[in-house]
Image (cartoon, rainbow, N blue to C red):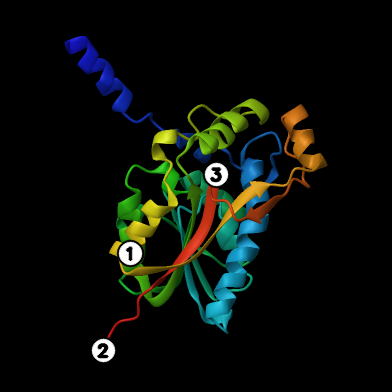
Amino acid sequence: MNQIENNKLEIQIPHPINNEFYTELGDRWYLADDDPVALLRAENKTKLPWIKSEISKHYENLNSLKVLDVGCGAGFATNYLAEYCGELTGIDLAAGALNTAKKFGTYPVDYILADARKLPFENDTFDVVICLDFLEHVTEPEQIVQQIAKVLKPGGLFFYHTFSQNWLAYLVVIKGVEWFVKNTPPQMHTYDLFINHKTVQSWCSQNKLEFQTVTGLRPKLNRAFFKMIRSGIVPKDFEFKTTKSILVSYLGYAKKCSEVS
């Protein structure tokens, strides 16, 4: 009986996620094609213009905006948005990734070594907060959303991207990348930390963040896609597209409720 109980307990313990490899990527964040980080770069070619477009629907003057990127990594989002928005800040606990972000940035961004579980900013500081491909890498995602809501101004926008928790997401995001992309580290993602969209919506609602819209993402099934399948190398023309299905991953945003006078 004790053995059965122990086996059940072992099944319930989440698998540890490997976040350490991000600190060692260096220039490979921006240059490698034989690494899953190349897929992340390709995703951002679709995600970031979409985010910029949605921001523009709410704000006429992007140059006046204060934007925070939580879990910014090597600064893909911050370095992109810095061309359009006024004041950019990125926080992460991977010092090496922040150094790479500074190296490859063209426009000024304030990169800070900080913990997303306790953001070092005053309440109601930022017009926009983005959190892309980060919630599935932490064991306290609800706490991250709470922190983001605090530092977001009333009327401000919270953008997020993460992975759904179902068998298809497991097969595509975890096993598919392991099988078909070279140099995929062990435990880069773990199914236990994937999050369904209704859960994120619930966290937003609890923190006075009103859901606005969501879209799915998937690779384009073209020549570049099948070239990657054959070679394990992510071609420079590998592309993602938005889709109505959020079964695998989803990109969405919420708006912080304005204060009632």
| Residue type pointed to by label 3 | Val
Q: Between residues 151 and 245, which one lies in front from this camera angle?
A: 245
Residue lying at the far right in this picture: please name it: 223
Residue occupying the point 56% across, 37% down: 173
For the C terminus, the image quarter is: bottom left
Q: Position of residue 19 (x, y in %)?
A: 45, 37
Given this view, does label 2 or label 3 mark the residue nearer the observer? 3
Q: Of marks 2 and 1, which one's residue comes earlier in the chain? A: 1
User: Mark 2 = which residue?
Assistant: 261
Residue occupying the point 60% across, 56% down: 244
Mark 1 and mark 2 in contact (Cβ < 8 Å)?
A: no
Q: Is residue 237 left or right of residue 164?
A: right
Q: x, y (%) of residue 168?
A: 54, 36
Q: State the residue position of label 1.
A: 205
Horizontal side of 48 relative to 206 (left or right) equals right
Q: Which residue is mark 3?
A: 248
Query: In the figure, residue 172 lies in which quadrant?
Result: top right
Q: Give the Cα distance between marks 2 and 3.
A: 41 Å
Q: Check if mark 3's residue and mark 1's residue have beta carbons within 8 Å.
A: no
Image quarter hosting the N terminus: top left
